[in-house]
Amino acid sequence: MSDLIKLDMPTPQFLDLVSWFSSALRQNETKLSHYLDNTKGQGMHLESLSKKSFFEILNVLVQKLKVYKDLGEIKTILGAIKWKYVARDHADLVNLNIFQALHKGNGDKENILRKAWGRNVGYDCKKIDD
């Protein structure tokens, strides 16, 4: 799967593949789970390979997230990276620069992700309750 998702393909087919991947790994359930929850009993070696493949896929998703401009595309990618992560995943998430991508997108001032965070807040002293 990690090799397939790296292929250059039209965006609609890529988003279908991403949706299928997330749905299959979650066993078509809409609950938040860890990506290894449904892989019990595979042993440490296979678990390590599964984790490596998962984060390779996540890396591709993060790169796409930075450049997508369509809100529907961004929502699909955000849905695909939404998992229940545990402490042992945090270093891998940091290495992907996922937090920077979520905060700044590709760094462009007009990037949708960058513009989605916060806003200037002005306080009207007359409306503050004492």
Image (cartoon, grey):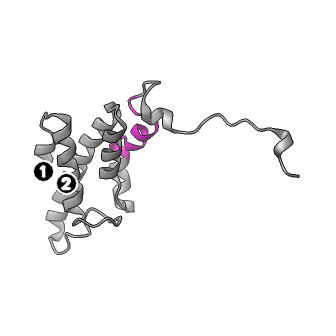
Label 2 amino acid? Phe
- Residue 115, image x, y percentages: 49, 33
Q: Is residue 97 magenta?
A: yes
Image check: 7 left or right of 18? left
Residue bearing the label numbered 1: 1
Over which residues does the magenta segment extend? 94-106
**Quadrant assignment, res 49:** bottom left
Image check: 26 left or right of 105? left
Q: Which mark is residue 21?
A: 2
From the image, state whether disc 2 or disc 1 is nearer to you: 2
Label 1 amino acid? Met
Image check: 8 left or right of 29? left
- Residue 23, image x, y percentages: 23, 59
Q: Are marks 2 and 1 in contact (CB under 8 Å)?
A: yes
Q: Residue at x 39, y 38 (%)?
A: 101
10 Å crowding of disc 1: few (<14), some (14-19), many (20+) = few
10 Å crowding of disc 2: few (<14), some (14-19), many (20+) = some
Q: Residue at x 20, y 73 (%)?
A: 40
Give me the C-alpha separation between circle 2 and circle 1.
Answer: 8 Å
